[in-house]
Amino acid sequence: MAYYVGIDLGGTNIKAGVVDGEGKLINKLSIKTHAERTMEEIIHDMGQLAADVIKDAGMEVSDIEAIGIGSPGTPDNNEGLLVYSSNLPFNNAPMRKLIREVVDLPVFIDNDANCAAMAEAVAGAAKGTKDSVTITLGTGVGAGVIINGRIYSGFNQAGSEFGHTVLVSGGIKCGCGRKGCFEQYASASALARMTQEAANANPDSVMNRLLEETGHANAKIAFNAMREGDKVAEEVIDRYTDYLADGLANAINTFMPEVLVVGGGVCNEGDPLLIPMREKTMSRPYFGPGVKQTEIRLAQMGNDAGIVGAAMMGMTCVLDGKNGK
């Protein structure tokens, strides 16, 4: 059995794990990122964490085929660089070179959302398929596309940014500079904003009491208020699932995946979200008579998606003969 190390680089934590060729997580460790530091210090710690997790698993470096890294931002896997990351002090960071100074293994890099999609394709909700799309609803909308078992990221590895496709022309301004992006209407942050706006406009709504109790808007409040019979909250959820379904249908129409995986904390709401999301989404794609239809499934990999997906991305790079040295 071949083994790989996956590193999930985040703004708060760096996680690493040893993963086998079937996507099974053998061992994992985590440290704080301390993103205020220089890129050299952070990358050195990534390399050390990789070495530590191998040792902690009772293995030697020689037992590992490669290291895969999932990072926010835009990578250059050919050159081993992280070209840019908005949340970390990286600009053309020589990630491969610096990590190999700590642990001498082939190193491959890809976007964290792409790695999450790879994890779902190999070991999660899309296991057994060749073509899938994974959409993650969080602070923004992350997306990863798997075509014929490989990550699709465009010629410059900056592709699959589905959260920055426009859903509402001239709509709410997005951090990317455009107006009306999908993530401004379908992310957990968007739902929190819609909740606050509806509560402000309707003083008698249950949402106002829940907002006072929590001290801030979040993606749970409208669902909780709806469960108490609040019609205003019900309207918020109905509008949110409309936006979400439009964006998901766009993803289906673009890629026609066998499985569309949806994840993120908001999915923990269960049937009040999932039932209307599925019904609305599946009524909108252009399948045509007799055409096989995409199946929508919930993400299964949870917090381990970044580690497993990064390792499996590294595995596919090795299998494709790419040079990570």
Image (cartoon, grey):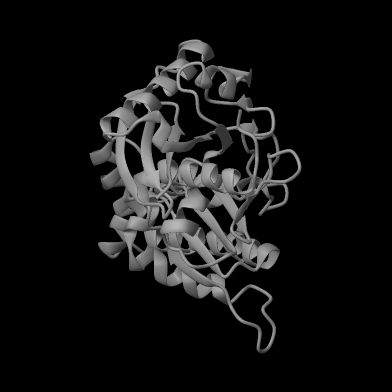
Q: Is residue 45 above or below residue 237?
A: above
Q: Position of residue 298 (x, y in %)?
A: 41, 62
Residue lying furthest bottom? 290
Closer to the camera in the image, 264 or 114: 114
Q: Please report the residue visible at 26 percent of the width from the left and 39 percent of the height from the top.
A: 214
Closer to the camera in the image, 97 or 270: 97
Q: Position of residue 147 (x, y in %)?
A: 64, 59
Closer to the camera in the image, 57 or 216: 57
Tell me the quadrant of the picture where the C terminus can be found: top right
Q: Please report the residue visible at 31 percent of the width from the left and 34 percent of the height from the top.
A: 59
- Say if residue 264 shows up in the picture: yes
The quadrant holding residue 35 is top left
Q: Position of residue 197 (x, y in %)?
A: 46, 45
Residue lying furthest right? 155
Q: Please report the residue visible at 52 percent of the width from the left and 12 percent of the height from the top.
A: 40
Q: Is residue 213 above or below residue 319?
A: above
Q: Is residue 262 above or below residue 160?
A: below
Closer to the camera in the image, 298 or 53: 53
The quadrant holding residue 318 is top right
- Say if residue 13 shows up in the picture: no
Q: Please report the residue visible at 36 percent of the width from the left and 66 percent of the height from the top.
A: 272
